[in-house]
């Protein structure tokens, strides 16, 4: 592989530099296995944050600030000299992770292109020109004579967008109109004889098109390498990490209760109504109704209850009482109690199991008679609408939720449900059922405190 070259600022002169890699080829760096995964997870936090922001309909200027903040929070290395290496390594690891299916490629391509756009846009004009030169784009600036001949038309376009008229020394590039489709679609360029006149402050569109085209082709090539050689060669080392990363949960650990340390059986009915997310509320109602849950449902609800503060003795008492109409005490102790103690780390390997994240729940595949999974993904539209109405979600909010469901933004649909039920915004979005519970309890306790 070739070494990726970057322009850096010289200490002896004022050479303008670019710190935005183009990811043309993977660098010949030795990467520790821990860094391989950790760097990728940090970058994934950035991409998922951008995805959430776009799904919530944030404005372009809000998205640019969000992307910059996410990058600063997640992609800084303890050693400043390693920042660029972390950037490059994390990109190529995730390229390997997301090359494997059409759906994964589409998401990664979209999010990496958006990230590149925001990072490019945040650079100075000089740094942008350096990046343009690295793309080796075959476009030259429009001559002064040609600029004068189309200046009035360029002014009309500027006025239509509420911008100042182009100055006499303004730089425009003349490019085939099909290479700037978003500018053409938004009527933000003057087109003449098949060419678009692109202002310097619009070149991001031109560069992003090139970036997206290169990355799209690279993902296909990476997929071929993954199938033909990498997957088999690395089946015991890298492949398990690669295959798990795209469904990794990136938030806090909820294996132990945090702020609300304990819930008792006597309070659970009321708490379930006020603070359980729909996935857990549905399971709770079903175990109350049917006095039984299949293994997937018991795991999903049981670990959630553990994470919100139900002690082992209470968990055994809760499940035993709920199953009692169908399962005798002796059979319960023999067939079910072991698994409950196992989840609390008291049996087997004594592993302290973690409650399921939204990502894990969404990716599950419930069968006939199962009640686990994500209602926003696995319920029929009729059943989901009815369940939302029972939670007290208004008709207008239900339509907003269903809109996100139809676009497969299941976690955002849950976030909108949370906001509708609690009358409070949740800018971070819902990423874990236990996060839903904790945030709900905070809101309810603050309301009760202010009422007192």
Image: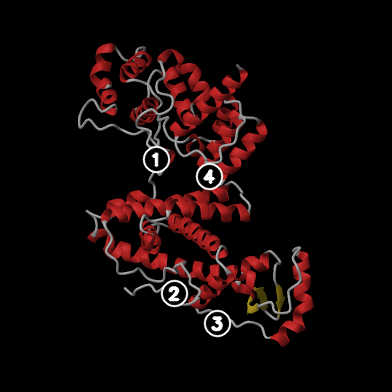
Q: Quadrant of residue 422?
A: top right
Q: Which residue is mark 4?
A: 409
Q: Residue at x 36, y 26 (%)?
A: 306
* 236 or 67, nearer to the observer: 67
- Residue 47 visible from this viewpoint: no
Contact (Cβ within 8 Å) of mark 1 with mark 2: no
- Residue 324 visible from this viewpoint: yes
Contact (Cβ within 8 Å) of mark 3 with mark 1: no
Q: Which one is in front in this view, the residue at disc 3 or the one at disc 4?
A: 3
Q: Please rate how many residues cluster around mark 3, counting C-alpha atoms within 10 Å: few if below 14, some from 14 to 19, many from 20.
A: few
Left or right: where 361 falls relative to 339: right
Quadrant assignment for the N terminus: bottom left
Q: Which residue is mark 1?
A: 360
Sequence-first tag of 4 and 1? 1
Q: Which one is in front in this view, the residue at disc 2 or the one at disc 3?
A: 2
Q: Which residue is mark 3?
A: 138
Q: Residue at x 50, y 76 (%)?
A: 14
Image mark for residue 116? none
Q: Which residue is mark 2?
A: 10
Contact (Cβ within 8 Å) of mark 3 with mark 4: no
């Amino acid at each position: 592989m070739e070494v990726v070259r970057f322009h850096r600022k010289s200490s002896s002169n004022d050479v303008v530099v670019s710190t935005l890699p183009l990811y043309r080829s993977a660098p010949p760096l030795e990467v520790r296995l821990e860094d391989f995964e950790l760097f990728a997870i940090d970058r994934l936090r950035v991409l998922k944050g951008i995805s959430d922001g776009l799904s919530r309909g944030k404005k372009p200027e809000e998205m640019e600030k969000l992307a910059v903040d996410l990058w600063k929070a997640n992609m800084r290395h303890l050693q400043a000299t390693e920042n660029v290496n972390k950037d490059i390594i994390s990109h190529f690891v995730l390229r390997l992770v997301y090359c494997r299916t059409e759906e994964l490629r589409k998401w990664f391509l979209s999010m990496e292109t958006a990230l590149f756009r925001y990072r490019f846009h945040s650079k100075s004009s000089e740094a942008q020109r350096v990046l343009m030169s690295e793309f080796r784009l075959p476009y030259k600036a429009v001559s002064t004579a040609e600029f004068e001949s189309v200046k009035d038309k360029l002014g009309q376009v500027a006025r239509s967008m509420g911008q100042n008229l182009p100055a006499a020394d303004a730089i425009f590039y003349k490019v085939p109109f099909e290479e700037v489709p978003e500018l053409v679609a938004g009527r933000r360029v003057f087109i003449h004889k098949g060419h678009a006149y692109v202002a310097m402050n619009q070149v991001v569109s031109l560069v992003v098109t090139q970036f997206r085209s290169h990355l799209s082709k690279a993902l296909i090539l990476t997929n071929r390498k993954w199938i033909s050689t990498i997957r088999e060669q690395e089946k015991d080392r890298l492949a398990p990490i690669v295959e798990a990363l795209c469904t990794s949960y990136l938030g806090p650990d909820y294996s132990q209760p945090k702020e609300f340390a304990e819930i008792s059986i006597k309070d659970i009915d009321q708490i379930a109504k006020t603070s359980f997310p729909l996935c857990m509320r549905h399971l709770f109602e079903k175990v109350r109704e049917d006095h039984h849950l299949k293994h997937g449902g018991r795991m999903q609800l049981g670990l959630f209850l553990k994470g919100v503060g139900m002690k082992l003795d209470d968990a055994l008492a809760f499940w035993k009482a709920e199953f009692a109409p169908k399962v005798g005490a002796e059979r319960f102790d023999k067939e079910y109690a072991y698994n409950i103690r196992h989840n609390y780390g008291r049996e087997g390997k004594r592993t302290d199991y973690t409650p399921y994240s939204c990502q894990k729940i969404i990716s599950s595949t419930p069968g006939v008679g199962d009640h686990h999974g994500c209602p926003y993904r696995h319920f029929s539209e009729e059943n989901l609408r009815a369940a939302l109405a029972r939670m007290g979600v208004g008709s207008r909010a239900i339509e907003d939720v269903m809109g996100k469901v139809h676009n497969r933004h299941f976690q955002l649909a849950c976030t909108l449900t949370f906001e509708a039920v609690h009358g409070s915004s949740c800018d971070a979005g819902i990423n874990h059922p236990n996060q839903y519970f904790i945030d709900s309890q905070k809101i309810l306790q603050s309301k009760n405190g202010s009422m007192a």
